[in-house]
Image: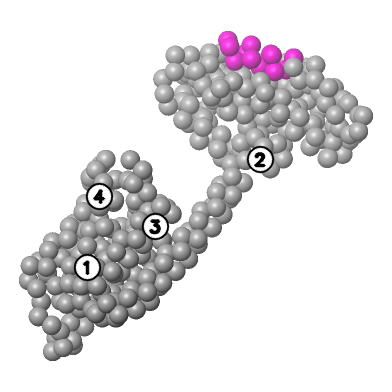
Amino acid sequence: MAVLDWMQPREVGAARQTVALLCGVGVTVTVITYPLLADDAPATDSVLATSALVAFTAVVVITALVRYLGETSRFAWAVCPLLAVSAIVLVDLATHDASIRAQIFFVFSTLYGGALLPRPGAIVMTLASLAGEAAVVLSLLSFRDATTGFLYMGAALVTTSLLLVRSAERQAAMMAVLEHHATTDPLTGLVTRRFFDVATEAALSPAGTDGTSLILLDVDRFKSINDQWGHPGGDEILVQVSELLVTLARRGEVVCRLGGDEMAVLMPDCSAANAQRRAEEIIARVREHPFTVGPGETVTVSISAGTAHSPSNAHDALTLYAAADAALYQAKRDGRDRVSTSVLSATT
């Protein structure tokens, strides 16, 4: 349900802390100031006050227990903020208090929505706060005073919510950019080692029928390419090899630049024999591909590859990489432009 999604906090831990803080501040301020204002305070409506206490207690208890509620916590997070607004309204009506000291607590619910909820949820909380504000001032003040108070407080609530939402969205966008840079190689557009390690662990977790295979590749005599064509020429070769690997990759496979000219292809649910055939296909396609290093300049490139398979050669990501790396170096020792398959046993 869309409304439930809107009301889920971006960070549950931060939401719990914020609710605890706002509730604590509200209770503390009320306890400290009420005796000072008791002489001027109107009689309290006991029914409304009891209802407010029940609503407030429900917010505190549900928030404290939300980590243990499982799937129902989505409903709890949607209901609790609205219960809190209801509690504020009931307290103000019970005490017949429409002063600024009573209305200010509607800012708390708006702060929660703007700081911790996605934009639609923030709008819901702002509208709820505005509705609560209107209910209080229209019930307790003359129409003129209610209208004036609502406009002033409403402007404050809307402005607060807008500024918080815009700030949170800017921060989220910045974090998305940083995350993208952390997981994407800026030269080739392939994923980085950081993301690849996570993907490998995930691929090794399920018990696929054919296991998981890994191909490590690097460009043969890449230093000579850099020496002849300069680093811009070498970068062009890496970009074009990466593009070729991506076109040859199948659904669910992950292509990574590990560093320098070394790349990897992670192939979930792929047998050792299929991995070797795929590696041979990649090597043949690279050999046949005309690589450009400048206007009208083409070069022939070859690569070497090493393959390893889990569970045949390894049971974990580190050992799988080590097995493929050893096979890659064997391919280079055997003359390059070829595939070598790991012969290591997972039990050794």
The amino acid type, in three-letter code, at marker 1 is: Val
- Picture coordinates of residue 328 (x, y %)? 67, 22
Q: Is residue 21 left or right of residue 345?
A: left
- Is there any visible trace of residue 247 in the rendered image? yes
User: Residue visible at 75% across and 33% down?
Assistant: 239
Task: Tell me if residue 3 comes above or below residue 311 in the rendering.
Answer: below
Where is mark 1, residue-wise?
Answer: 89
| Towards the viewer: 102 or 73 | 102
Where is mark 3, residue-wise?
Answer: 123
- Picture coordinates of residue 42 (x, y %)? 13, 83
| Towards the viewer: 289 or 208 | 289
| Quarter occupied by residue 194 | top right
Start and end of the magenta stretch? 273-284
Which numbered disc flags the more N-terminal residue, 4 or 2?
Answer: 4
Colour mode of the rendering: one colour
Overall secondary structure of the magenta section:
helix
Where is mark 2, residue-wise?
Answer: 185
Q: Secondary structure at mark 4?
A: helix
Q: Secondary structure at mark 3?
A: helix
Q: Nearer the viewer, mark 1 or mark 2?
A: 1
User: What is the C-alpha distance between the residues marked 4 and 3?
Assistant: 18 Å
Determine contact: label 3, label 2, CB under 8 Å: no
Q: Nearer the viewer, mark 1 or mark 4?
A: 1
| Quarter occupied by residue 341 | top right
The amino acid type, in three-letter code, at marker 3 is: Ile
**Mark 3 crowdedness (10 Å alpha carbons): few <14, some 14-19, many ≥20:** many
Q: Is residue 118 left or right of residue 285?
A: left
Q: Secondary structure at mark 2?
A: loop
